Image (spheres, rainbow, N blue to C red):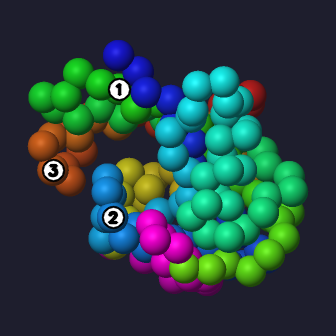
Amino acid sequence: MKRLLTLCIIYQQSKVLLGMKKRGFGAGRWNGFGGKVSPGETIEECVKRETREESGIEINEVAEVGIIEFEFKGNPEILEVHIFKSNNFSGEPIETEEMKPEWFPVDKIPFEKMWPDDKYWLPLLLNGKKFRGKFVFDGSDNILRQELVEIAVV
C-alpha cells in the first residue's frame, strides 16, 4: 500500500529554509515542509497548503524535482514522497504548532540532525538536478538499501 506525500525545500540565494519538526513522525529532526495529500487535492495544492500551515510561507511557484519511495522494515506501507523546491514565495517564516523554521547557509545544512537519506538527495536538488529514488530503513535510522538516480524528467 502506498501513501502519497509531499516535501518542499524553500531556498533563497545561498540559504535553505528548514523546519524543526516538533511533533509526530520525524519529531526532533530538521526537514522541509510537506505532508499527506488529502482526498480531492492535487500534489501541488498539497505542498502549497502544507508549507503554509507549517511555516507561514505562501508559495507562489513550485517545481517538482524528485520522487522518492521510503520503506520501513516491518511496515507494509510505502511512502511515495514528491519533492519540490521553491524560491518564489511571500511572507516570513513563523513558528507553528508543528514546525520551527530556520534559515541555514547551504554549506551549513544540519545533515546530522536530519533524516539519513537527506544527505544523498538534497545536494542534487540544490544543484538543479532532478532525481528518483528509494530508501529502505530498518526499524530506526539505518538505511538498509538505497537507490538514487539523476533523471532528465520527473
From mark 3 to mark 1, how far is it between C-alphas? 16 Å
Mark identifier at residue 140:
3
Residue type of the residue flagged with mark 2: Arg
Say which of marks 2 and 3 sits in front. 2
**Quadrant placement of the N terminus:** top left
- State yes or no: residue 81 in magenta: no
From mark 1 to mark 2, how far is it between C-alphas? 21 Å
Residue type of the residue flagged with mark 1: Ile
Q: Estimate how packed mark 2 is, as few (under 14), some (14 to 19) or many (20 or more) residues with alpha carbons within 10 Å.
A: few
First of labels 2, 3 by sequence position: 2
Q: Residue at x 15, y 50 (%)?
A: 140
From mark 2 to mark 3, how far is it between C-alphas? 17 Å
Q: Which residues are magenta?
A: 96-112
Query: Which residue in the protein does label 1 denote?
Result: 78
Q: Residue at x 46, y 71 (%)?
A: 97
Query: Which residue in the protein does label 2 denote?
Result: 23
Q: Residue at x 44, y 56 (%)?
A: 118
- Is residue 100 visible to us here? yes
For mark 2, give the secondary structure: loop
Q: Position of residue 21 (x, y in %)?
A: 40, 67
Residue type of the residue flagged with mark 3: Ser
First of labels 1, 2 by sequence position: 2
For mark 1, give the secondary structure: strand
Q: Estimate how packed mark 3 is, as few (under 14), some (14 to 19) or many (20 or more) residues with alpha carbons within 10 Å.
A: few
